[in-house]
Amino acid sequence: MPLTDPDRLFPTEPRLRDLARALYESVADLPIISPHGHCDPAWFAENDRFPNPAELFVVPDHYVFRMLVSQGVSLPDLGVPRVDGGPVESDPRKIWARFAARYHLFRGTPSAMWLDHSFEHVFGLTEPLSAETAEASYDHIEACLAQEAFRPRALFERFNIEVLATTEGALDDLSHHRAIRESGWHGRVITTYRPDAVVDPEFEGFAANVARLGALTGEDTSTWQGYLAAHRARRAYFRSFGATATDHGHPTARTEDLGDAAAALFAKVLSGDFTPDEADAFRGQMLTEMARMSLEDGMVMQIHAGSRRNHSAGVFAIHGRDKGFDIPGRTDFVGALKPLLDAVGMEPSLTILLFTLDETTYGRELAPLAGAYPALRLGPPWWFFDSYEGIRRFRETTTETCGFYNTAGFNDDTRAFCSIPARHDVARRSDCAYLAQLVGTGRLREPEAFEVAQDLAYRLAKEAYRL
């Protein structure tokens, strides 16, 4: 029995379902452009087998373990590492059994659709995961992982990935990307410049991080101009390893353009004696500075605003960042972005991709902004809205104001490698369902729908990220 319905996510009305299916079939086999995500470049540099099913599906995936934690399973019992190196469950079969026994918790969620797709289409499983099938499914996946065909590079090629962008911090030496380049393998894995640790005064170790930035670049990062020069140098280093984009995960979309006053603010946040508002102002100033640097070097700028990161102080203290406790918050874009847009928003050679976790801003703020400013494009539904419903709401709310061509296609933003084809499949099916509805209601001609389907699945992401 298949785990996935071949007509999943298509409309139920027969004529529209037939059209959605035809649209999907026209894009289903297109190469995957994965321009933003958090896969580990070491996978492709070393090309070692994945350790076991638990390490592949449970331990690194906050979509999975946050649901289990919400039902009372502890992070240590799922093998999630502690920052102090303390003990956590080390038996992958026990982790898998806990996951399998609670797999019903994912019913109706996008995670279930991604996981079932991976189980069926990557590993050939035919029985739903449960406590009863846990041992057999573990053994089956483990046997697959022992084969050369399931090593990272082989899966990369099997998934038909044309390009995959990872995300590294400004202080990363990119040694894994160097190893990939020197290995002779032809898979295209590039990096992305993520400077949060050296632009966010509230990031742990900020002053020490800025000092390290100076040591890496030979610039005097105790001065404002030296600090900016160091960023330019690191951006150039990242570009030498294929980077076409930067990424900024700020709690707000605030921007500033302080002119000469920026140097004094930098000195204050570097001293450690600053208020939360001053920290936010400095982050905002750096968004504008990064946009100016993008005008200089051509890098695409991504702003992932509105996540209230590490909401649980206890989980953050014990397990660190990215452990399922980043929560959406209300986000202002119209007022917050105005200083940046006044400075560079009318530049047609600049591309700034906006992402939000606040859906209320789609129609009121984001689509009107992207429908007016040449520098702006809308990134796809992100994180909590990377789902059929999220994609549908995004298209319904934004298309009428900014069209399809002020958006950037799809990116999967994942740490779970095997979910990449699943997530792109959901996006392609969801978009084709929406396009079929537009044709069925007379808002789009059928030949146009086939063209737009190609654009949404492939071309827009490739062009937006300059790939």
Image: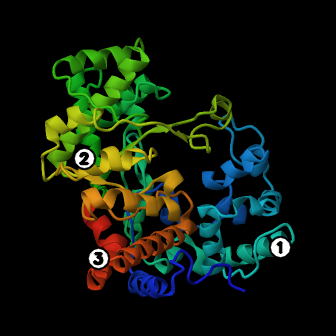
Residue underneath mark 2:
369
Q: What's the CA distance linking mark 1 and mark 3?
A: 46 Å
Query: Which of 425/285 is in front?
Result: 425
Disc nearer the start of the sequence (3/2): 2
Question: At 30% across and 16% down in the image, what residue appears?
Answer: 267
Q: Residues within 10 Å of mark 1 (few under 14, many from 20)?
A: some
Please name which of the two marks, 3 or 2, marks the residue nearer to the observer: 3
Q: Position of residue 3 (x, y in %)?
A: 68, 79
Q: Residue at x 31, y 47 (%)?
A: 366
- Residue 387 seen anywhere in this rendered image of the structure: no
Q: Which mark is residue 133?
A: 1
Marks 3 and 1: in contact by CB < 8 Å?
A: no
In the depicted structure, whether residue 219 falls above or below residue 465: above
Q: Quadrant of the C terminus?
A: bottom left
- Residue that mark 3 sits on: 444
Is 341 on the left or on the right of 330, as rendered? Answer: left
Q: Which residue is outermost to the top?
A: 273
**Amino acid type of disc 1?**
Thr
The picture places residue 132, in percent across and down from the top left corner, at 87, 71
Q: CA gap, disc 2 to disc 1?
A: 50 Å
Label 3: how many Cα within 10 Å (few below 14, some 14–19, many 20+): some
Question: How busy is the neighbourhood of tag 2: few (under 14 within 10 Å), some, or many (20 plus)?
Answer: many
Quadrant assignment for the N terminus? bottom right
Q: Nearer the viewer, residue 88 or 370?
A: 370
Left or right of 68 in this view: 419:
left
Give the x, y percent position of residue 317: 65, 30
